Image (cartoon, rainbow, N blue to C red):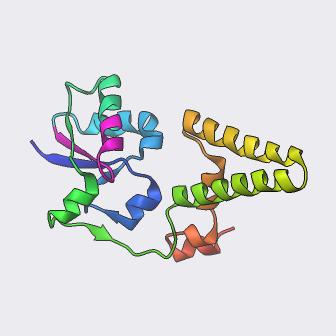
Amino acid sequence: MDQVILDVREKDEFDAQHVPGSIWVPLSQFSHLAPGILQTLVGRRVLIMCRSGKRASLAAQQIEQLGFSGQVSAEVFAGGILAWAEQGKSVVTRRRGHLPIMRQVQLIAGLCVLLSVLLSFQLDRRIAWLAAFIGAGLFLAGLTGFCPLAELLARMPWNKSDPRERCQT
């Protein structure tokens, strides 16, 4: 039985470091992309990998919910890419000069909430509605898996992995 690695991390994480030959299927799009990919992996051993193991476990549950548990032998690689690299196994690493997009979202959202609360005490209580708006946006992003701020940040020039992408409009 051939072994295949499914990497369920997001694009910026995968671009920064991944196992050579692994298949990228981000957890945020897993239920849409996985059925077609899993169909091609019937009868094969599938290692599911993320950074440390939590998202891979969620992907394993989705494989079961999608009805592929009897068709592919899927298991979570314990410890994720961190453990893989620690064990001295081969990884492709690309150093990039920016923070992962989700960290950028956390920094921007956190700073906006903090500033709006502080300014609401000093200037006008209505400014606190900005914090409520950001909180609602984060809640909806968690609920739906779609984060408009992350999408916007992904299009910023400093987040482009290919220099040719920076020139496109």
Identify the image quadrant of the C terminus: bottom right
Report the number of discs: 0
Reply above or below: 90 against 149: below
Kindly give the residue lying farthest to the right in the view shown: 124
Residue 153, quarter of picture? bottom right
Q: Residue at the spot x=20%, y=28% of the render?
A: 71
Q: Quadrant of the N terminus?
A: top left
The residue positioned farthest toward the front in the image shown: 121
Question: Is residue 155 found left or right of 71 in the rendered image?
Answer: right
On the question of residue 21 being in view, the answer is: no
Q: Position of residue 87 (x, y in %)?
A: 14, 63
Task: Decide whether residue 100 is among the magenta residues.
Answer: no
Residue 51 magenta-drawn?
yes
The furthest residue to the left? 1
Residue closer to the observer: 127 or 78: 127
Q: On the image, which quarter does residue 140 sit in?
A: top right
How far from the left and from the top, in percent, is residue 91? 25, 66
Left or right: residue 10 versus residue 66 is right
| Viewer-closest of 24 and 94 | 94
Image coords of residue 94 (percent x, y): 37, 73
- Identified at 61% across, 73% down, the residue is 166
Foreground pick, 97 / 115: 115
Residue 157: quarter of image: bottom right
The answer to whether residue 98 is visible is: yes
Residue pictured at 85% horizontal, 48% vertical = 127
Percent position (x, y) of residue 118? Answer: 77, 55
**What range is drawn magenta here?**
44-58
